Amino acid sequence: MHKLLPSILLFLILIMPFSVFSHEGEEHAHDEPAAESPAQLESGNGWRVIRSLEIGTSGKLVHMVLIDHSVYTDKTIYSAAINRICPPDAEFCRIRFWSQERFIPEKVSLTTEQNKHLRADYLVNKTAGTHHLRWSCSVDPDKKHCF
């Protein structure tokens, strides 16, 4: 027994650097999308950011926002989210809104079903000279403003 204990301790000491520091200095391509931690995500009355996803490796984010289903036709809720998430001097800001969490994508690209349930899409890209807020026809039935 006395010989076994030092051998076990020596074994643990030798393998510890491999297990404790195995990720140090390594770059990993995890399957999880780049997103902010839940503690950093914005929210407000009637809305909350579910995730913020990077567009490729550009550093630009698309914020995926859930609007309470009971108030998804109230455009002031969208305005409040936009004003809170996008700084006035932002060069780029994109927010996509849904009223059902199950349709909010895990990736920047949307499936047909996710796009069908999209309630609004806000985009500011000063470099491209783009600034628009488009509505689904369920929020704004005016064919001039809806998609």
Image (spheres, rainbow, N blue to C red):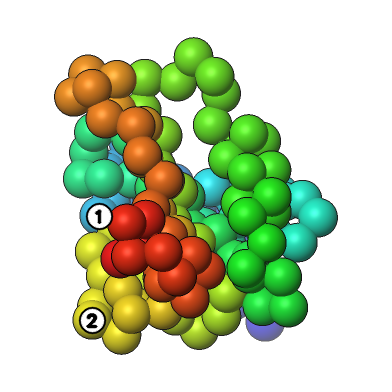
58 or 48, which is in the foreground? 48
Q: Identify which residue is drawn at 58% across, 40% down.
A: 82
- Figure quadrant of the C terminus: bottom left
Q: Is residue 50 above or below residue 79?
A: below
Q: Position of residue 62 (x, y in %)?
A: 39, 47
Q: Identify which residue is drawn at 23% across, 81% down.
A: 112
Quarter of image, res 85: top right
Judging from the image, what secondary structure is the residue with disc 2 in?
A: helix
Q: Is residue 122 visible?
A: yes
Q: Which mark is residue 112?
A: 2
Pointer 2 local density, CA inside 10 Å: few below 14, some 14–19, many at least 20: few
Q: Is residue 10 visible?
A: no
Total residue callouts: 2
144 or 33, which is in the foreground? 144
Q: Position of residue 144 (x, y in %)?
A: 32, 56
Tag 1: residue type? Ala
Outermost residue on the right side: it is 45
Q: Identify which residue is drawn at 41% across, 45% down.
A: 133
Q: Which mark is residue 45?
A: none
Q: Position of residue 34 (x, y in %)?
A: 39, 51
Is 68 displayed left or right of 7 in the figure? right
Is 12 displayed left or right of 68 in the figure? left
Mark 1 lies on residue: 29
Tag 2: residue type? Thr
86 or 71, which is in the foreground? 71
Alpha-carbon distance for marks 2 and 1? 27 Å
